[in-house]
Amino acid sequence: MNQTERSAVLRERRRRVEAAWSGASFDGPVLIPASLPIPIDGTDQFHEFHAHPEFQYLSGVAEPGAALAWEPDSGWTLFAPSLSVEDLVWMSAPPSAEALAKETGVGCSVDRSELASWLESRRGQGMALLGSRDIEARASEYGLQAWSTLEAAVDEDATEWLGKALAGLRRAKDAVELQRMTHAVDAAVAGHLAAQRLARHGLTERALQIEMEAEFFRQGGARTAYGSIVGSGPNSAILHGTPGHRVMSDGELVLIDAGAEIDGYASDVTRTFPVSAEFTPIQRELYNVVLAAQQEAIAAAGPEVEYKSLHVQASATIAQGLIDIGLLTGSAEDLVASDAHALFFPHGLGHMLGLSTHDCGGYLEGRVPEDRFGLAYLRADLPLAPGYVVTIEPGVYFVPALLNDPARRERYAEMVNWDIADTMLDFGGIRIEDDVLITPEGCQVMSAALPKAATEIEAIRREALGSTTDRGHG
Ligand code: GLY
Ligand code: MN
């Protein structure tokens, strides 16, 4: 897609936003700052810049210190930052207002020095403030006087209403977004494959992370979408575990949950595989339970399907799998109703994916997360629709903190075979996660190029281990 086509999609995106916003009982100006870089204490450097997703969605760019404005009468204005001569000694020049006009399709793209007079002429008028609120505390870095002197009357109700309308529109991804997400997912797949080909006995989690992320970046990744999770052995049960210097060993599992970010869009993919060429019998059995839960959820995903029902079905499949191997007793339905499965599947089926890894809009208006062990971490509760991208990522884990918790042992005394559970406290965990685009007919697995059947994973691992003269022991 070339720049002209991209900016046409962005203009259409903003037209949809305008149409949604026209339903508000508010017709004042809307300001959407992009956000500013956050300084690192004790240095003259900054943390990696993350543009506010609302700004990035509406503009299609991620320019630090920029701002967008909208008014029903005058439409969109982009305030493009420019740097002083002194700053240009240290930093790259930002794109000009003209260049941003072409890229974003916002015809009225002006130097940010005009933001002060724009605000001045709206002094005292009710205004919605979306995007980053850092402008209130750091106005001077947007080229303004102190925010308080502007007497900007932020209408919080309007801000909330417009923000919710925007979050709703951001659920269905348009052509530009899907192109960026496809690129991000492809980079993730390449990185995961590189890691699966490299892993072996004696390697550290950190070494695997480095090579996987290098592949993300070679494929166009600007950075990782979130801190990569690489856990070996018992560490694979730490849901957001940071890769460390732990050395992996034959007989253990490795869980990698990692994605690349490209043009602001996240990918989020998880695979679990053996350090040796093959799963052990119990690893394979549990792996296939997770895989069945994941494949059933993908097969059922489609327009109008309630995401929560997919989670509940996956929970029942996992419960049944754990009954079959003797870890749980009772009926899957009763176990799910009492949240017993959550001892081993203590998170939700997944979440919306987009500009954020856990993208906005996961909960339909009026719905809230339930305060129940088996549902508290469900990040999405809404009927699916074409264009939504969600992750589907069930798992089974042996988390010592949960399984040794006296209150839970008492509550689930009769439902868990604790003798078996106690022998598996260092098993770790298994998660399988794909990025799934809902289509009018059903869904499309964007990360389908990354194999996940146990036999396919073993084939990759066999080839990887067989192709080295030194199996890396030691
Ligand atoms: N991949 C990390 C998460 O979904 O929380
Ligand atoms: Mn995820």
Image (cartoon, helix red, strand yellow):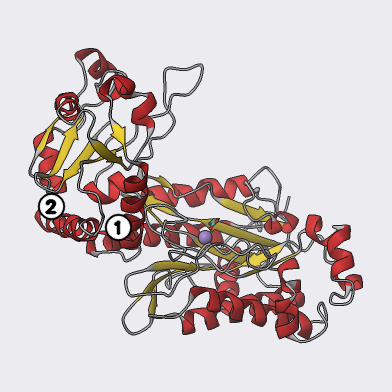
Residue 152 relative to residue 300: left or right: left
- Compared across the picture, whether 25 is left or right of 289 comes to left
Q: Does residue 452 appear in the picture of this structure?
A: no
Q: Residue at x 32, y 58 (%)?
A: 165
Q: How many residues crowd around disc 1 within 10 Å: few (fewer than 14), some, or many (20 or more)?
A: many
Disc with the residue nearer the chain's start (2 vs 1): 2
Q: Is residue 350 left or right of residue 412?
A: left
Q: Residue furthest right?
A: 419
Q: Judge by depth and name the residue closer to the eye, 179 or 369.
A: 369
**How far across and down, in percent of the image, does residue 228 sit?**
54, 50
- Amino acid type of the residue tagged 2 in the rendering: Gln
The reply to whether dot 2 and dot 1 touch (C-beta < 8 Å) is no
The mark found on residue 296 in the picture is: none
Secondary structure under tag 1 reads: helix
Q: Quadrant of residue 461?
A: bottom right
Rendered-image quarter of ligand 1? bottom right
Check disc 2 and report the residue beneath it: 3
Mark 1 sits on what residue?
180
Element under disc 2: helix
